[in-house]
Amino acid sequence: MSECGGRGGGGGNNSEDAEDEGGGPKGSGSLSPAGAAASSEGRIRRGLRGASLMARQRPELLCGAVALGCALLFALKFTCSRAKDVIIPAKPPVSFFSSRSPVLDLFQGQLDYADHVRQDSEVVVLFFYAPWCGQSIAARAEIEQAASRLSDQVLFVAVNCWWNQGKCRKQKHFFYFPVIHLYHRSFGPIEYKGPMSAVYIEKFVRRVMKPLLYIPSQSELLDFLSNYEVPIFLISCSQYFLLGSIGLFILSGF
């Protein structure tokens, strides 16, 4: 029963309650330390009596409280026992380019294999990407388009440089993606820093493949200079500033 139910008896109970609350008879003045302790003990006794009386009158409440406590303890133990399973290993990478693509996709970061195939090709374009990177995803179609136009002359290789178990991630430390490197059999790498557009990538590769360009007339030279904003070196069989029937060779910068 509640506390007010404990005060429904005769005068003997009232006298005991008064002594419990005040540490002595009513009107005894300020409480001593011993009286304060006795008052606290009296409140505890009354609370226990009330709980015991309620348990006798409503046993289903006691059973419910015990069942709820057991359920909470079980849930806490189950949660703590599974805390070690929160951390799961990363999913293995998947192909970034389709199997029909002209680009060789090393989606597990096999940099050693990329170096191997590079030894057997005259010109190789390496496309380093991160599969989550929006710029890499946007450049994928442009690389495929350039590779389809140059596949008979140039080998295009894509390397996932983000997979933490791949050699590319362990050996390369790029601060941005994607990164394009071009290798010629006799030199390289040359990093491409132009727009991620198939047209510009193709022009860049062709300039490396054929660095010497013959220009037979001054008008064609002016047209070339208006289209290519790159450093050039002028070479001719006579003095380089003379344009005549001999023509002009231009070595394009990369």
Image: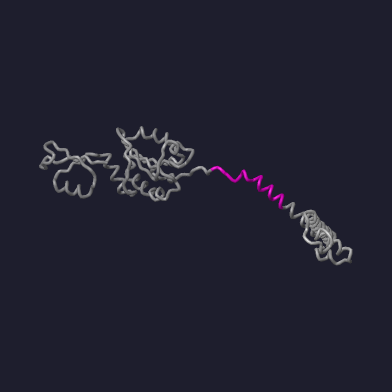
How many numbered marks appear? 0
Pick the residue in front: 135 or 123.
Answer: 135
46 in the magenta segment: no
Residue 222 as seen in the image, left or right of residue 12 = left
Q: Residue at x 34, y 42 (%)?
A: 151
Magenta part of the protein: which range?
72-89
Q: Residue at x 63, y 45 (%)?
A: 83
User: Can you see residue 175?
Assistant: yes
Q: Main secondary structure of the magenta part?
A: helix
81 in the magenta segment: yes
Pick the residue in front: 134 or 21.
Answer: 21
Q: Position of residue 223 (x, y in %)?
A: 18, 49
Residue 99 as seen in the image, left or right of residue 184 = right
What colour-coding does the image apply?
one colour
* Figure check: 30 above or below 155: below
Q: Position of residue 97 (x, y in %)?
A: 43, 45
Q: Residue at x 30, y 32 (%)?
A: 186
